[in-house]
Image (cartoon, rainbow, N blue to C red):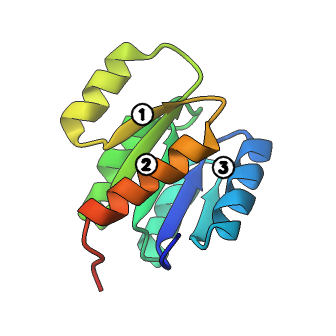
Amino acid sequence: MGENLSILVVDDYQPLVTSLAEVLNREGFEVKTANSAAEALEIVEDYPVDIMLTDIMMPDMNGVELYRETKKINPSLTAVLMTAYSAEGLIQEGVKEGITAVVDKPVDIKFLLALFGTITRIKPKVT
């Protein structure tokens, strides 16, 4: 299913990052992981990333701010926010910035995979 797409999973909760990475790898995605926004920015600078799946609330930078910064490096990056909290203001801000979707935690893997399938059909692969 992954069609060699690269996904960056960003969350300050390591067990979630690890489990999402394992599932996405099994589905054929190339997965990079980061436990902070700063680490995510380094990865985006060094590797081509198609989709960023990021927590909305992190200690060093929120997911919307991270998306803004990553778009400066990779304008074609698609982003999906994950949240366990009610963060309506940030979600609205993210939608205005171009965030593709918001998923609730705990993450429904089947829904996430279907969402990624929709994203990859809409977004042409940039080579």
The label number, if any, that marks residue 102 in the structure image = 1
* Amino acid at pointer 3: Asn
Q: Residues within 10 Å of mark 1 (few under 14, many from 20)?
A: some
Locate residue 72 relative to residue 6 in the image: left or right. left
Q: Is residue 22 left or right of residue 81?
A: right
Going 70% across and 58% down the picture, which residue do you hit?
23
Amino acid residing under circle 1: Val
Relative placement, left or right, of 9 versus 69 is: right
Image: 94 above or below 5: above
At horizontal 28% and vertical 57% (from top left) the residue drawn is: 71
Residue at x 47% of width, y 59% of height: 41
Which mark's residue is nearer the viewer, 3 or 1?
1
Distance from the alpha carbon under mark 2 to that under mark 3: 23 Å
Looking at the rendered structure, the secondary structure element under dot 1 is strand
Residue occupied by mark 2: 115
Circle 2: residue type: Leu
Residue 118, image x, y percentages = 35, 55
**Which of disc 1 and disc 3 is earlier in sequence?**
3
The vertical placement of 78 against 36, above or below, is: below
Point out residue 110 in the picture as x, y percentages from the top left corner: 59, 45
Relative to 40, residue 74 above or below: below
Q: Secondary structure at mark 2?
A: helix
Q: Is residue 37 visible?
A: no
Q: Quadrant of residue 51?
A: bottom left
Q: Is residue 73 above or below residue 62?
A: below
Task: Give the distance between the C-alpha atoms of the residues marked 3 and 1, in whole angstroms.
Answer: 19 Å
Which residue carries the number 3 mark? Answer: 35
Name the quarter where the C terminus is drawn.
bottom left
